[in-house]
Every structure is written in structure tokens, then in C-alpha cells.
Image (tube, rainbow, N blue to C red):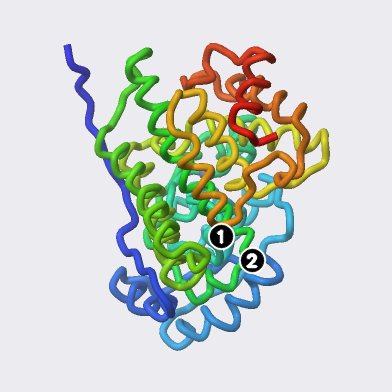
Amino acid sequence: MAEHYVQEIVIPRRVAFGPGAVQKIPYICEDIGIKKLAIFSGKTYTKKITSDVIIPQIEDSLDFSHYTFPENVELEYLHSKAKEIKKDQSYLMVVGGGKVIDYVKVIASLTNSEYLAVPTNASHDGFSSPYVNFILREQISNFKGKSNFSKYSPVSPLAVVGDTNLISQAPKESLTSGVGDSLSKWVAVRDWKLANRLKGTKYDIYAATFSEMTANMVEERVISLKRLFFSETGVRVLMKALGSSGVAMCIAGSSRPASGSEHLVSHALDKLSHEYGYKIPHGHQTGLASILMMYLHGDDWNRIRNILLEVEAPVTLKELGIDRDIMKEALQEAQKIRPERYTILAEGLTEKAASNAIEMTGID
Ligand SMILES: [Zn+2]
């Protein structure tokens, strides 16, 4: 008998993309009825953007406070910040990259507030999804039971403002990372379908198709623009694709459409990075891992490799800055990180198979 359940979808209410999109912020705030805003940014580059570009848009019409996050923030810090602003703020705005946006997602959950996301780069799809990065999620689950973190739940952004003038100025590395994160959706959806066929995992064809389409959009634009992909036209498509990937997660009520075996490999690389001392952008890891996982799915891995090559994103371990043994370890550890998420790696990869995948895809 079919399972009966009520599906609730919470997606961003207002989305603005394009050059000068930040000029829409006062109108978006007015339409939503925002009168008071707590603005968060990082402490250097994004602090300057907030002061020079964002605050001038709203200072005449809104009451606001501007907070900056230190480099690395502990959950205790987010908890105390939440307490501090809870008294009189119900709307938050975050100006920054993935890490800062994730911190604000946590504060939004702890304070029951809503937030507007103003991403300053397009390195991955976190700016429009309710979910936080893997390491922060682990910290939160270890922290649960302490203070009010037991009530933590993912919060979708109320609005997303992607100003391509700002994002085009981000380092090229962050944009090539965005391409890698975008292409990983092809693998994530294949893993999701596999989990549905073999384990009966709930599958949502709407969210899956939507997610795959976001990677198709990037592919099409990379092929037509080639090296000019990093012009405003290309960056706009990348933003739209990553933003829509976040919306696909909102529709699915899970990160399934955007994160499969390739993200597990990336999480494993994150874990190993402490031991081996490297730091690689998220989308460079998921991009390269997508080549390998597509090979394991027996599908067209060259399609992913060719697009990464076109935008000069890493397609070899050397370019990623790690050696073969680290990748082999990551491939073997990946599924253990999230055993409940069934993927092509679920049965485990033997050392021989890991070596074969690395050799066959030419990433060595
Ligand atoms: Zn990602």
C-alpha cells in the first residue's frame, strides 16, 4: 500500500539575479515587511562589501545592526550570538560565502528567524539550500542535547540576491568550484535512483529532474561560451544553476538531489585533510569525484571531465594537490561517513577497484 504522508515545501520567496541585483534589496525588504535587520558578514572582504555596497542600499529605510564572524566559529559562539540577537530581531541577512551563510542558517534555526542570503561567490549551492556543510552538521549532531541545539532544524532562505557584478569579482577558483559542484548533480541523481530501486528510498522525480537540469544548464553554457564562461552571462547561469539546485533540495526536503556518492568522497577528503594538511575547494573535490563516480555507475564520465577541462577546473589528483593514496583512502572511507545514504559506494570499494577507477578515468 502506498505510504501516506504530507509533503511540505519551503522555498525562497524572492530571488533576484543579475548585475546590480543588490539594488533590489530595499524593495524586497519592503514587500516582505522587514523593518529591522541583523546583517552578518565575514570579517574582512565581505565586511567591506557589506559596508560599501549593501548598507548604502538600506540605511535610509531600515533599522539594522552589522555583525562580523571571526575566521572559525564554534557552536557555543553561534549559540551566544543567537541569544544576543533573539530579543529584537526576526529577520537576518547574510553577506558572504558558504561558511558564513551556514553560520547564519544555524542562528536562524536557533532564533526562529528568517534570513536573506546575499552570496559573494558561486563556489557551491549552499546559498539557496536549507542545509549546512558536512562538518558543521556533524558538530551539531554531537552537540545535540546540549542547550537548545536539540531544536535545530534546517531553514530555507526567505530570499536570495545574487549580484553578478559582485560574484564576477570573486577568485576564479571559486567559480570553477561552482562548476564542479553543479556537475555533481548528475551523479547525485543517479545515486538517488539507485537507492530508490534497490532500497526503496523515497524518490521525487520533480526534485530529481529539476536538479539534473541545473547541471545541463551549466554544460550548455560552458560549451557555447568556452573560456568566456566567466563573463557576466556565464556567471549568471552558474548562479541560477546553483541557486536552483538549492531549491531542488527544498523541494525534496533532503539534500538527496544534490548530494550522492561524489559528495561522500568529498566529505571523506575533508576528514582526511586534517591528517594530511591540504585545503581544497568543495566543488573541486565534488567535480573530480563525480568523474570517478560516473565511471562506477558505468556512465559517461568523459562528459563531466570535458566540461571541467573547458573551464580549467582540476581533472587530476595532481591539480587537486593530493596523491593517489589519499584518494584511494577517501574512496574506501566515503560510504562509512553516511551509511544510511545508499549510493554506488554502498557495497564498499576494494583497493583494486579504487585503483582501477583512478587509472581508467585518467585522473592520476
Ligand atoms: Zn556541494
Rounded to the nearest angstrom, the CA distance separating label 1 from label 2 is 7 Å
Is residue 88 in view? Answer: no
Q: Is residue 156 above or below residue 298?
A: below
Residue under pointer 1: 175
Is 334 above or below relative to 1? below
x%, y% of residue 176? 57, 56
The image shows residue 79 at horizontal and vertical percentages of 62, 48
SS at mark 1 in the image: helix
- For badge 1, the amino acid type reads Leu
* 331, above or below 267, in the image: above
Question: What is the residue that sits farthest to the left in this orientation?
Answer: 1
* Residue that carries the numbered disc 2 in the rendered image: 171
Is the C-beta separation of discs 1 and 2 under 8 Å? yes
Q: Looking at the image, which is closer to me, 38 or 251? A: 251
Tag 2: Cα neighbours inside 10 Å, few (<14), some, or many (≥20)? few
Which part of the image, by quadrant, shows the N terminus? top left
Residue shown at 39% from the left, 73% from the top: 18
Q: Secondary structure at mark 2?
A: loop
Of residues 233 and 267, the one nearer the viewer is 233
Callout count? 2
Question: Which residue is pictured at 18% across the width and 16% down the height?
Answer: 2
Percent of width and height locating residue 297:
46, 24
Q: Is residue 197 above or below residue 358?
A: above
Q: Quadrant of the C terminus?
A: top right
